[in-house]
Amino acid sequence: MSFDYAASRATADRLIERFGTVFTLLRAGSATGDAWNPVASAPASHAIIAVEIDEARRPHRDRGRGEPAHVRAGDGIIPIVGDTIDEAEVTEVRPLSPARIDVLYAVGLAR
């Protein structure tokens, strides 16, 4: 019998939605065109739901990696290093993905 990780993702999504906050994730626009005429598109804005983690409750080994947050996997956007979440730069992204099912993303933020 295998564990139902899809159900775990649904539970994580519900809990983060219930106790989380809506944040704005900005992703830099991409450059199009050629070297003679580059055109940069505007940053893309995405509404995400995340739970910020209290610094005092973090394990000692994780300190110094930026303020942490857990981002809901069900938002349709996967955070990447270099994104901005409410004016804080994403410095690391660690997906929690048992059995290749993204349950949530642990994100380090530099303010």
Image (cartoon, rainbow, N blue to C red):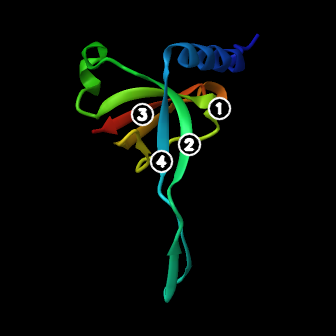
46 in relation to 27, above or below: above
Task: Point out which mark residue 107 bears.
Answer: 3
CA neighbours of label 3 inside 10 A, class few (<14), some (14 to 19), many (20+): many
Q: Are marks 4 and 2 in contact (CB under 8 Å)?
A: yes
Image marks 3 and 1: residues in contact by CB distance under 8 Å: no
Image coordinates for residue 108, horizontal then vertical, percent: 36, 35
Q: Residue at x 34, y 37 (%)?
A: 109
Question: Is residue 107 rendered to the left or right of residue 42?
Answer: left
Q: Which residue, given by chain and number where applicable, does mark 4 sit on?
A: 26
Instruction: Please state which amino acid type lies under the numbered disc 1.
Output: Arg
Name the front one of labels 3 and 1.
3
Task: Locate residue 8 relative to residue 107 in the image: left or right.
Answer: right
Sequence order check: which comes first, mark 4 or mark 2? 4
For mark 2, what is the residue? 46
| CA gap, disc 1 and disc 2 | 24 Å
Identify the residue under disc 1.
100
Q: Return the residue nearer the eye: 13 or 46.
A: 46
Q: Which mark sits nearer the N-terminus, 3 or 4?
A: 4
Q: Amino acid at mark 2?
A: His
Residue positioned 26% across, 24% down in the render: 61
Element on which disc 1 rests:
helix
Q: Nearer the viewer, residue 63 or 38?
A: 38
Identify the disc placed on residue 1.
none
Residues at badges 2 and 3 in contact (C-beta under 8 Å)?
no
